[in-house]
Image (cartoon, rainbow, N blue to C red):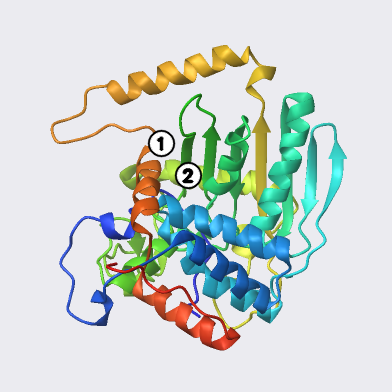
Amino acid sequence: MTPQPEDGPGHQIPLDKAPPVAVPPGPSLAPLQRLAADELTAFCVAVLRAAGADAPSAEAATRAMMHGSRLGVDSHGVRLLDHYAAVIAGGRVNGCPVMRPLSTAGAVATLDADNGHGALAAYTAMDLAMDYAERSGIGAVAIRNSSHFGPAGAFALAAAERGFVGLAFCNSDSFVRLHDGAERIHGTNPIAAAAPVAGGSPWLLDMATSAVPYNRVLLYRSLGRPLPQGVASDADGHDTANADLAEMLAPVGGAFGFKGAALGGLVELFSAMLSGARLSFDIPPMGGDDLATPRNVGAFVLALRPSAFLPEAAFAAAMGRYLDTLRASRPVAGGAVMAPGDREWAEAARRVRDGIPIDPTTAAAFDRLAHHYGLVRPAPLRGA
């Protein structure tokens, strides 16, 4: 298993769509494998069940990972399977949790996730929030005693697919420095939002409040690619493009990184202070040798029913006009304007046609997992 700090997905470059860069020769240049989505889904569920997860936990974790792998959020796709199997088998994540709402009041609740998988906690909380929103127009659920939940956009999207506006937040162990700081304070603390679009794919925002998620560092390390400038720092807080030397991440915003640091604090407010979960700098690291001690990660989801605010047709018309105008706006020379989610939906369509790509590190992990649990791992698609 490759240790990896917990983080949110942010805006991802698909594995095989990243800008070309000079890479040194070596095993990291192994070609990407492409796998069929249905076989990959079945393999992930089978591995998690074999590791000790019950059916709801295995299916929720796989649903979230496949969201990432289908939409090109590869850092939070199936490359997480190895880690998830290890922490369930080790006991850090309860494979058979009994999740229960606490402190219910009107249209809000706190969900005790019983140290279960974060994806099951977040989907359960969003279902509860949507039930509240169906009755009251709004529903909000804070989550405590949770764990890594994968791509935050998966849970906001779950709301949009049922006609609600959805938001999702999660804190995580410290890996992001403050603006002009040289010490880890916040997690990558993602923010995700989604809204339904009549006749089209939902509007979908999914961003880390760090310049990149740390899983992006691990992905570039696996592929032998240098990092973009200004996104990661070495142990002394100095910028580095060497993925092997990256010890902390910069907040989003570059020269104006105080904005990203403040957004990280906003996620902390919702995910930890309102839920009773640990603050980022109190959460044990996601990586490391201890696979048995629960971490009490926090999260927060919110659902809004548009028709509680105005006629549903008016909301749909406003969304349509906004997106039509945005996409038709004049780009800079050589550029293209897109709404949040457009790149991901286009990538999802390509992957339906071509299969799901996995990097060499993930391919090796699949081989180990299949051998360990006596499973048949998906074979690469012919010609992939």
The x and y percentages for residue 376 are 52, 80
Q: Residue 59: which disc?
A: none
Which residue corresponds to the image point at 66% horizontal and 65% vertical from the top-left? 58
Q: Is residue 186 in view?
A: no
Residue bearing mark 2: 206
Vertical arrangement, residue 28 with respect to residue 133, above or below:
below
Which residue corresponds to the image point at 69% horizontal and 63% vertical from the top-left? 57
Vertical arrangement, residue 230 with respect to residue 87, above or below:
above
Q: Is residue 292 left or right of residue 78?
A: right
Q: Quadrant of residue 338?
A: top left
Classed neighbour count for the residue bearing mark 1: other residues with Cα under 10 Å, few (<14), some (14–19), many (≥20):
some
Residue bearing mark 1: 340
The x and y percentages for residue 261 are 47, 47
Q: Quadrant of the C terminus?
A: bottom left
Q: Amino acid at mark 2?
A: Asp
Q: Nearer the viewer, residue 128 or 368?
A: 368
The x and y percentages for residue 358 are 38, 67
Which residue corresponds to the image point at 13% horizontal and 32% vertical from the top-left? 333
The x and y percentages for residue 252 are 40, 47
Q: For the residues labelled 1 and 2, say whether their Cβ atoms are less than 8 Å apart.
A: yes
Which residue corresponds to the image point at 61% horizontal and 16% vertical from the top-left? 312
Classed neighbour count for the residue bearing mark 2: other residues with Cα under 10 Å, few (<14), some (14–19), many (≥20):
many
